């Protein structure tokens, strides 16, 4: 499946391909899904249940504009144990990396997990 380029990001909205979303998103090989986290600004294992079936090789987390969203140590450990490359960055930087990676690694399974506000 073609990887979807992020065209624009502004606080509270993201444009992927030709559609604008006003909620946090998971960018999966099958499309875009709304992303709610159990603990709001903390990513726990439960928040990533939808991604495992894709056997991701890379996950890029967007932490929001000022970077308030955190990824738990448990999640980091699981990703490391599974040899999944991951990046945790403020969303604008995460999106730049996303767009670079989908071009640089067209055959890798890359997941985007983007928080759009704080």
Image (cartoon, rainbow, N blue to C red):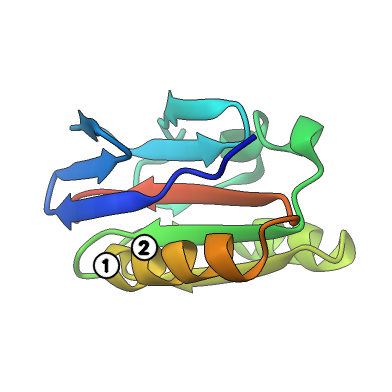
Kindly check if marks 1 and 2 are in contact, taking CB atoms under 8 A apart as contact: yes
- Badge 1 density bin: few <14, some 14–19, many ≥20, Cα 10 Å: many
Q: Can residue 37 be seen in the rendering of this structure? A: yes
Q: Quadrant of the N terminus?
A: top right
Residue 40 vs residue 104, the one in the foreground: 104
Q: Which image quadrant is residue 95 in?
A: bottom left
Q: Is residue 61 above or below residue 12?
A: below
Q: Which mark is residue 37?
A: none
- Badge 2 density bin: few <14, some 14–19, many ≥20, Cα 10 Å: many
Q: Which residue is mark 1?
A: 92
Q: Which mark is residue 95?
A: 2
Q: Is residue 116 left or right of residue 112?
A: left
Q: Is residue 105 left or right of residue 27?
A: right
Q: Residue at x 81, y 43 (%)?
A: 55
Residue 71 vs residue 35, the one in the foreground: 35
Q: Can residue 71 be seen in the rendering of this structure? A: no
Q: Residue at x 79, y 31 (%)?
A: 53
Q: Residue at x 19, y 54 (%)?
A: 9
**In x, y percent, where is residue 37?**
44, 36
**In x, y percent, where is residue 26?**
47, 38
Residue 10 vs residue 15, the one in the foreground: 15
Residue 36 vs residue 85, the one in the foreground: 85
Q: Secondary structure at mark 1?
A: helix
Q: Is residue 63 above or below residue 2?
A: below
């Amino acid at each position: 499946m073609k990887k979807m380029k992020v065209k624009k990001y502004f606080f509270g909205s993201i444009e992927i391909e030709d559609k604008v979303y006003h909620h946090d998103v998971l960018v999966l090989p099958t499309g875009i899904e709304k992303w709610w986290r159990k603990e709001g600004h903390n990513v726990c294992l439960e928040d990533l249940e939808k991604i495992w079936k894709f056997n991701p090789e890379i996950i890029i987390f967007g932490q929001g504009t000022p970077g308030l969203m955190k990824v738990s140590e448990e999640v980091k450990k699981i990703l490391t144990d599974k040899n999944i490359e991951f990046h945790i960055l403020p969303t604008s930087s995460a999106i730049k990396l996303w767009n670079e990676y989908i071009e640089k690694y067209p055959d890798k399974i890359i997941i985007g997990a983007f928080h759009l506000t704080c």
